[in-house]
Image (spheres, rainbow, N blue to C red):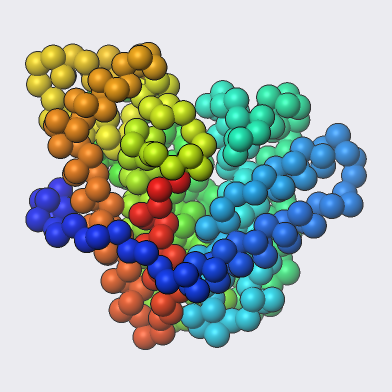
């Protein structure tokens, strides 16, 4: 893979036509608006207030939009695909609530994390209820597609848990290498994106071969999306990024950038990045130095090439399908080249 990336030509960032971006934004707004009604009247409030808080968090809703566009490609109307899109977004929020507990994260989307505001016990229950609500939405689909959807959805839930376990294990290991990190991305980021796209195809009763192809596209997009996220952690200039620049290095996280830096570093650079590898985060004052060292080692350029490589693989897989849509390809490229 590394040789392929190094030989790949880096394409200019693709900017989707304004009309397509507006359509994608409208679908995301539809999902966000419907989410607010999922638990609107439920009681007891001690449980459902935090659930409503999470569902009103105004995420980008990229994964449910991928599902809606994949289903649309096969002629499925929004109304029929929307419950599955909601299930995907609710499940994503379930994962975030539990991730925040395990990572001791203080904020999520610019607001206090659930466990910070209501305590760990309530946050755990909130996540559990969200998982139930996701399956509740999924159960609203037509009976003939439900078994296949349940299989894909449950397989994805299991993969997310496996990926989180591997990610946690990385925290105590000083020998993690880039291929292992990519495998972990596949279990977490990739699994959720791929399932979103595959389930849209299942709703449209696509062939097994087409379901497999669109799933593969989602896995490639997951790698591009996560590596771009790692890259933005150090180089984002868009104020909408909303995170502390260099936060991953300060927390001692093993990211694509850090692992690549370690594979290239020698001497003083090796010693500098080795401290992070052994679980000691950098001080904020050292982030500029880390950025300069990574730039000198060619890490940023390689990361950009890798994002371009996996984005190209994802788009080519979708565009090889008998039925395809410009909107889906455009959204995939937007996701992989985003600045925030």
* Percent coordinates x, y for residue 229 in the rendering: 39, 43
Nearest the eye: 16 or 36: 16
Residue 292 falls in image quadrant? top left
Left or right: 328, with 319 as reference point: right
Residue at position x 52%, y 48% in the image: 158
Left or right: 146, with 292 as reference point: right
* Residue 81 visible (yes or no): yes
| For residue 20, above or below residue 196 | below
Residue 319 falls in image quadrant? bottom left
| For residue 7, above or below residue 328 | above
* Percent coordinates x, y for residue 285 in the rendering: 35, 14
Residue at position x 34%, y 29% in the image: 254
Residue at position x 65%, y 61% in the image: 29
Residue at position x 69%, y 72% in the image: 141
| For residue 316, above or below residue 136 | below
* Percent coordinates x, y for residue 80 in the rendering: 67, 76
Q: How many marks?
A: 0
* Percent coordinates x, y for residue 182 in the rendering: 30, 44
* Residue 218 visible (yes or no): no
Nearest the eye: 17 or 216: 17
């Amino acid at each position: 893979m590394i040789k392929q990336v190094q030989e790949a030509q880096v394409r200019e960032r693709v900017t989707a036509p304004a009309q397509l971006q507006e359509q994608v934004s409208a679908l995301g707004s539809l999902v966000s608006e419907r989410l607010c009604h999922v638990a609107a009247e439920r009681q007891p409030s001690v449980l459902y207030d935090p659930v409503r808080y999470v569902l009103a968090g105004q995420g980008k809703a990229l994964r449910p939009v991928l599902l809606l566009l994949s289903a649309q490609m096969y002629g499925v109307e929004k109304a029929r695909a929307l419950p599955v899109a909601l299930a995907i977004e609710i499940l994503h929020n379930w994962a975030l609530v539990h991730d925040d507990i395990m990572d001791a994260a203080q904020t999520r989307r610019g607001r206090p994390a659930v466990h910070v505001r209501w305590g760990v016990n309530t946050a755990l229950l909130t996540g559990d209820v969200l998982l139930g609500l996701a399956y509740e939405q999924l159960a609203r689909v037509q009976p003939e597609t439900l078994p296949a959807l349940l299989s894909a959805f449950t397989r994805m839930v299991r993969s997310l848990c496996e990926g989180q376990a591997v990610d946690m294990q990385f925290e105590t290991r000083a020998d993690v290498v880039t291929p292992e990190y990519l495998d972990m991305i596949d279990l977490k980021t990739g699994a959720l994106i791929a399932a979103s796209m595959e389930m849209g195809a299942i709703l449209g009763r696509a062939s097994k071969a087409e379901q497999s192809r669109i799933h593969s596209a989602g896995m490639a997009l997951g790698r591009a999306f996560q590596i771009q996220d790692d890259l933005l952690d150090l180089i984002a200039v868009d104020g909408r990024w909303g995170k502390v620049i260099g936060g991953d290095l300060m927390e001692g996280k093993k990211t694509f950038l850090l692992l690549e830096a370690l594979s290239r570093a020698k001497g003083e650079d090796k010693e500098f990045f080795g401290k992070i590898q052994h679980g000691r985060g950098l001080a904020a004052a050292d982030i500029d130095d880390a950025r300069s060292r990574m730039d000198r080692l060619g890490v940023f350029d390689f990361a950009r090439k890798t994002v371009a490589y996996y984005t190209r693989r994802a788009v080519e897989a979708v565009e090889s399908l008998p039925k395809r849509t410009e909107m889906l390809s455009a959204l995939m490229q937007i996701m992989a080249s985003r600045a925030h």
